[in-house]
Image (tube, rainbow, N blue to C red):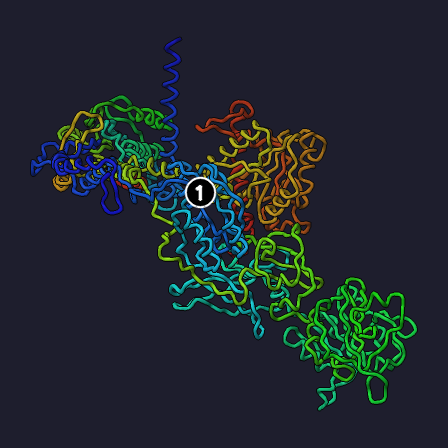
Amino acid sequence: MLTLGSLGFTAPWLLLGLLALPILWLILRAVPPAPVRRLFPGVVLLLGLKDDEQVSDRTPWWLLLLRMLAVAAVIVGLAGPVLNPETEDQAGSGPLLIVMDASWASAADWTARQDALDAALAQATRESRPVALIRLTAPEQTAFQSADTVRARLGGILPAAWEPTEADMTRSTEILPEGAFDTLWLSDGLARESRSELLTALKDRGEVRVVESPRSLIALHPAGFDAGNVVLTAQRLGASGERTISIAAHGLDPAGRPAVLARVPATFAADETTATVELSLPSELRARVDRFEIEGQRSAGAVTLPDDSLRRREVALIAGRENREGLELLSPLHYLTKALAPTADLLDGALLDVLPANPDVIVLADVATLSEAEETAVLEWVDKGGMLLRFAGPRLAASDVSRAAEDPLMPVRLRAGGRTVGGAMSWGEPKELADFPQDSPFFGLPVTGEVTVSAQVMAQPDPTLADRVIAALTDGTPLVTRKRIGAGQVVLVHVTANAEWSSLPLSGLFVRMLERLSVSSASESPDAEDLAGTIWQPVSVLDGFGKLEKADNLPGVAGEDLAGAPLGSDLQPGLYKGEDRSLARNVIGADTQLAAMAWPARIAVGGLVRPKETPLAGYLLALATLLLVADVIASLALSGRLRGAGPTVAGLALMLMPQDAPAQSTSEEAFAIRAASEVTLAHVLTGDTALDDMAQAGLFGLSETLFFRTSVEPADPIGVNLETDELAFFPMLYWPITPDQPTPSDEAYAKLNAYLRSGGMILFDTRDADVARFGASSPNGRKLQALAAPLDIPPLEPVPADHVLTRTFYLLQDFPGRYNIRDVWVEAAPPDAELVEGMPFRNLNDNVTPVVIGGNDWAAAWAMDARGAPLFPVGRGYAGERQRELSYRFGVNLVMHVLTGNYKSDQVHVPALLDRLGQ
Amino acid sequence: MSQVIPLRQSAEEEASHLPPLLARAEHLAGTVLLGEHGRRRAGLGDDFWQYRPVQAGDSLRMIDWRRSARGDSQFVREREWQIAQSVMLWVDQGASMRFQSDKNLPSKADRARLLTLACAIMLLRGGERVGLTGGHLPPRSGEVQIARLAEAFSHDTDEDFAAPEARGMLPHSRAVFASDFLGNIDPITHALTKAADRGVRGVLLQVLDPLEESFPFKGRTIFESVGHTVRHETLKAAELRDRYLERLARRKAELSQLCRLTGWQFHTHHTSDSAQSALLWMWRAIDGGR
């Protein structure tokens, strides 16, 4: 093989053929183009004319060039050019171990990795090397087998959503196969301490080659919250120039469909590895976000799941007494406000005013009695999932609320007066908190001695009391009690919300307790201590590509692990649900730093992609064919023979083009253009072919007659389908009646009525010579009545002698068709039409009559074939021809009437006009 | 029997050419009549032309008594076109006329026949007698003659450039010759001088295809007449253009010179132009020769 740069030739000797090109040039140049034969009557005038110069016309240089290029392309193509030929490759022998990190960081270019793996396996197949494969994220005992077997499983090898843990690495080191082997390590490029141990073990066995992706890895940190905005931080591996990424917030839209709720671009400065962007979202929208994702990065690291931390709870704070100026620290709401303000939206206002806002939590601090309306409304709200948090206080202690019977909005009955301990006038020490019981939501929170209670309201012992206590004092008296109502709950803290009765509101425990009650949501990811003792059930987990999957079949995770343990197959990144709230465990933590792996210098590190070997022969030969086709066309054009070929070429091109134009609309358009470009008569298709043909021929005859006799020059008539075709284009419709034609649909009738109202005319023809007189019971007459019943037809009368139809073009008394019956019905004259003295006719309707009804079988009398010969006999002899002539005249009058309206009737005004002109 | 059916078939085929030509010619004729002559077409009888005083030799029957009663002298009511004029037609049926440079243009023969037939229809309606030169179809009047003319026009001949037929021309009649007049000019000269000798005046209508006026050819070309009898080969057709056009202009000049000598009228019509304008010109030219 001959190699020139990145180009190789499999048959380089063929290139010598290029030397022949100049000779070909000379030969082709000398041959003149073939003569064109043309028919030309003026040739006699040319006889004897001599050409000025006797030199033959030469082929133009550009055509020669075209041909040369084609020949050159053929020669080079046959020489077998190959781009990036695979000349040499890392040869090896013996078993090959393939180690894949298979972490989330490899997911973004997983296809490239699989290609590289496939190429390595293909090579191993060629070299008959046995292959074993280890995924570090899921190490399994492996043995060397034939490369083809491994290759068959290739599609099923997927990246995990976590990085290999130390335990994984250790296990991988332990399960390395026996004997010496070479290693190909498909690394994800991230630095990990644990790599060195495995690397040492591998180097002991043989050659190690590392393949890494040169692509920059981008990961997304968990969404933070700052001053009302969502803060998103992306990090990349290695600062490599300015780059802009797009971060999308996914969630359910109001219709419940997954959608992109917001999209924000983030830009890495040229020498920065992090990019931070703030996203301002309305809180309603913010609450619906279920994940943020860097678009175009298909990896679990590019996805971050917000949990409740983005969800700002709405908390309504209502105190029993008015705030007095200057006594802020005594305000019952002061400590609550301080504790909740950073993480919740606080609502102020009267109870009935805040309820429509549907807050998540209502805090009643020392509110004793509620009005009946308030109580009903609050009860209903709690029943739907609201949480009512009540604090005790002097008022509650003094009131009779929940004294004799349990108040619906109190978890327990209270004893009168409450108690005070450890005060100046009482016995004993202030009481401390007992450890939280196991079934309490506070279980696991550390109880410190700093919280003391000096006064409280006391719960009345009840059978249900034990179940309702979720926090108690060391002497066993309840401190916090809870009762579930429907989907919601009522919690009573038996001390005040300020520091009057206890030091609880001053302690950090108070805030954590509020978090556990999900009155507030944690602003930062909770630490192990916060989550101690809780069990979290995975709701959905991320796969390596960053796709959320249901996690119903995974076991629950202890809170401590969730907070601190590294991700692995036991703790997969995803969304976990606790008792009242949910927590997300993301691949990238808030303080994760991406660092590139620095491999020891002895290890060969290669890229994923190598230029692919591309044979070019096919392209070159195709190019040569194209050039030759161009040459054919150009030669034809030169010799002037392309004119006839033009349409053929265009037709071929059309055939090759994708036919995706909607045929329906084009046919409708074609119909509209055909019907509207000329005056066109139309008949209604009845479904009876013979009758439709007859109507078509009749209207054709009438059109021809109009064409010759009048200035109306109609196009060929059209048969219209009432159901599908637009009627507005036609001045009149001829509707022959058969007893068995289908009745049009309601839509068609609506169309017909619109047509009649907008000035159209229908000529109904029962074609039965009206033997039974109009309206009586011939089959066609009955059918006509049935057909016309839904139509908007005015009162009718037989054509009066002074109707404008009798004189629009010809003067007529009769309206014969193939039959000659006088009764033809048109719109009746208005009742007040009177014959004026001296006028030949009355001033009748102003409009065109919408229908003309008769039975004279006009179409048959009009019908003519393409040569103008009548198709049907009319009458006998000359009288018959006369009748046909009159039927044509009727047709002409009818069309004139349709087109000109009552123009001829306006002649009644002629005397008045003449009078006015003084004639 | 076996011969009747092919005969019948070919007769039907031939007849099928007629109605379109007739119809188009009638339509064309109708437009001109409507435009120029108005009501004359619907006239009730012979047209009034003028009153003139009675001259010696006028019979008493010719005196218009109503007019004469108004005054002392007697008047004769003269009517227009009381004597029918004979108009002889000749349309080139040669192969060269069957040339059309473009699908959308009619062939020269088509246009020549259409114009001549339309002219004949107008003349026949005006009461003239119309026939063909050469004695095959002597001049007659009446609507039936239209069909006969149309039938006669539908026969093509094989020869390439037909010579005008000047035989059988009635003295002092009118004549219409329609052709491309590209063939030998001697027969044309002969026909026209012969006609002029007999006192026949008329119209020479040259029908040309636009291609024959533009000569847009290039490169090596073999030109052939439509009948494939004449051919001329050139290596550079574009070079010939000017000389060809010069020859064509000379041919036209010769023809119009010939017409001036013989009292005929000459007009060149291109198939790309409207037939109506050519018909108008013909009508005026014949009317003027009255």
**Residue A397 visible within the image:** yes
The correct choice, above or below, for A891 with respect to A215 in the image is above
Q: Position of residue A890 (x, y in %)?
A: 54, 36
The residue most toward the bottom is A326
Where's the N terminus of chain A, which quadrant? top left
- Residue at image mark 1: A179
Q: Residues within 10 Å of mark 1 (few under 14, many from 20)?
A: few
Residue A871 falls left or right of residue A182? right
**Residue at coordinates 38% horizontally, 63% vertically from top-left?**
A240
The residue most toward the top is B1
Q: Nearer the viewer, residue A850 or B149?
A: A850
The correct choice, above or below, for A132 with respect to A229 in the image is above
Amino acid bearing label 1: Gly
Quarter assignment of residue A818: top right
Q: Nearer the viewer, residue B257 or A858?
A: A858
Residue A449 falls left or right of residue A118? right
Quarter assignment of residue A782: top right
Which of the chains bears the disc numbered 1? A
Q: Position of residue B171 (x, y in %)?
A: 21, 28
Q: Position of residue A7 (x, y in %)?
A: 26, 44
Q: Nearer the viewer, residue B120 or B207?
A: B207
Residue A27 falls left or right of residue B14? left
The correct choice, above or below, for A579 with respect to A314 in the image is above
Quarter assignment of residue A513: bottom right
Q: Position of residue B285 (x, y in %)?
A: 25, 40
Residue B106 falls left or right of residue A715? left
**Residue at coordinates 73% horizontally, 78% vertically from top-left?**
A449
How many numbered dots are placed on residues in this image? 1
**Residue B290 visible within the image:** no
